[in-house]
Image (cartoon, rainbow, N blue to C red):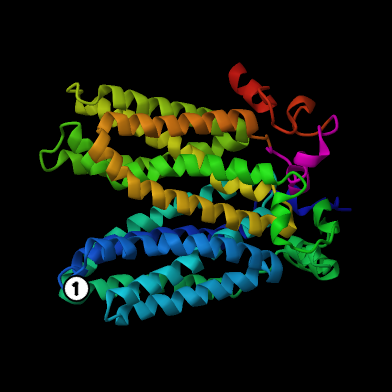
Amino acid sequence: MNKVRTMEDLPISRFHYKIFAYASGSTFIDGYIIGIIAVALSVMHTQFDLSVTMTGLIGMATLAGMFVGGIIGGYLTDTIGRKTMFLIDMLVMLIVSILQFYVNDPSQLVLLRFILGIAIGADYPIAGALMAEFSPKKNRGSLLGGLNGFWYVGYASSFLVGYLLLSLGDTSWRWMLASSAVPVAIMLLARLNMPESPLWLASKGKEKEANALVQKIFGEHVIMSNEAKTQKKTTFLDMFRNGYGKWIFFVSAFWSLSVIPTFGIGTYIPEILAQFGFADGSREYLGSAIINIVYLIGLLPALYLVEKYGRRPTLILPFLISGIALIVLGATSGLNTPFGLILLLFIVYGTFNTAMGAHQWIYPNELFPTHIRGTAMGFITGVTRFASAIGTFVFPFFLGNFGLAATLYICGGLLFLGFLISLFMAPETKNMSLAQSSSINKSGPLKQGSFVSNKTANGIGGTFSAAESRLREK
């Protein structure tokens, strides 16, 4: 007789990778749509008299839309369902991507890019919630964290497609912008066959339907987790009640503090390397390419370490190390430092910065219960996109008015602040069920025999977690 197990106790399977493919489409399309506009704008200038203000509005419209879309889309995800919203926002993206081909005025493009941003922002909480609710607890961290890597894949792909389409001449920008319809259409068709989340169904009182779905997918000896037994109505303000407000602050804070330097440095890295004295027409671009590749490569070991050693140490230590790397870079600016050393310091920063990026998907999807998981993730996504837009906008101001060293010191200081917040607030959720990880805030220490020690179940205070202790012993 087969032993009855919950979904979260199952080993990783082909089905889980299929859900990962559905969810990773969100980050791929985000990176692609944000990246393709940079190439398209370089061609648009030949047909439109774009002012600096209009260029900035076109560039920032998607990020502004994501702020709105994250907040609204997250709530709707918890209200009407994961699959329904997954299909609606893909359909909106498909229509708007095609409409970009026919714009006759830059202001029309600003509006369309804003709508695209709303759809992308809505897709983030759906992808995270769906992946979390289907993942085995022993692999949830790597599956959620891995979604972040596909942003870089989409971003790099957009530049390759843009480069290939340049041969079409003055109208190439129209084809570039409309090209996002291709991955969107593929993802829309793929998602037609995906299931609804059983945990969401159960949270809305459809437990019989949820259990039938679980057994259809995994077999008759598999059941849902204990979290699914509680039916709750989604209320927007619930993410600030019952102690969850501190998790909203924690995730919004560490995510924002990590992406402000990332977007600023990533956008202006050729100019930064030029100020280090490597503006000979090639090396600053070679360095930029290497550094951006590391942003993706650095994620791979993080996905292993986050499951082996836990969430806390793999968030706290990267914040500290990447912050130190930027401060050292600031101290070496203007000292005729060898190119290899500068590149090495940027690689250290980029590698550990990307390791932090995995937690942007892990923590918000583990710390909140099913009925507000999408709402919380959407709100946090909106906050961090607003922060990244502001950071990217003011970065050249600081660089031009205060110099390279001061700018890098500020970025390093932001990362050190993230280190302190993570040290005192980051909980350990490794190997927990979603019911456990979303209850550590109000349940107090977990019972003996659980996956983390009693002293560190809530992750607050200066005590190192069991995972950190094991890391030190290594």
Q: Position of residue 250 (x, y in %)?
A: 61, 40
Q: Which residue is mark 1?
A: 48
Residue 322 in view (yes/no): no
**Residue under the image location 59 percent in, 59 percent down:** 125
Residue 347 in view (yes/no): yes
User: Which residues fall within the magenta stretch?
Assistant: 429-448
Where residue 56 sits, quadrant-wise, is bottom left
Q: Is residue 35 above or below residue 419?
A: below
The image quadrant where one finds the C terminus is: top right
Q: Main secondary structure of the magenta part?
A: loop
Q: Is residue 438 part of the magenta span, yes or no?
A: yes
Between residue 223 and residue 45, name the one nearer to us.
45
**Residue under the image location 79 percent in, 64 percent down:** 233
- Residue projecting furthest to the right: 1
Q: Is residue 149 part of the magenta span, yes or no?
A: no
**Residue under the image location 41 percent in, 35 percent down:** 351
Where residue 182 sits, quadrant-wise, is bottom left
Q: Position of residue 152 (x, y in %)?
A: 40, 52
Q: Amino acid at mark 1?
A: Phe
Between residue 459 and residue 395, name the one nearer to us.
395
Q: Position of residue 44 (x, y in %)?
A: 21, 70
Between residue 431 and residue 285, name the one nearer to us.
285
Q: How many residues crowd around disc 1 within 10 Å: few (fewer than 14), some, or many (20 or more)?
A: few
Relative to 163, is 414 on the left or the right?
right
Q: Dot 1 lies on which element?
A: loop
Where residue 284 sits, quadrant-wise, is top left
Relative to 454, is 111 on the left or the right?
left
Q: Is residue 73 above or below residue 294?
A: below
Q: Position of residue 401 (x, y in %)?
A: 24, 38
Q: Is residue 359 above or below residue 77?
A: above
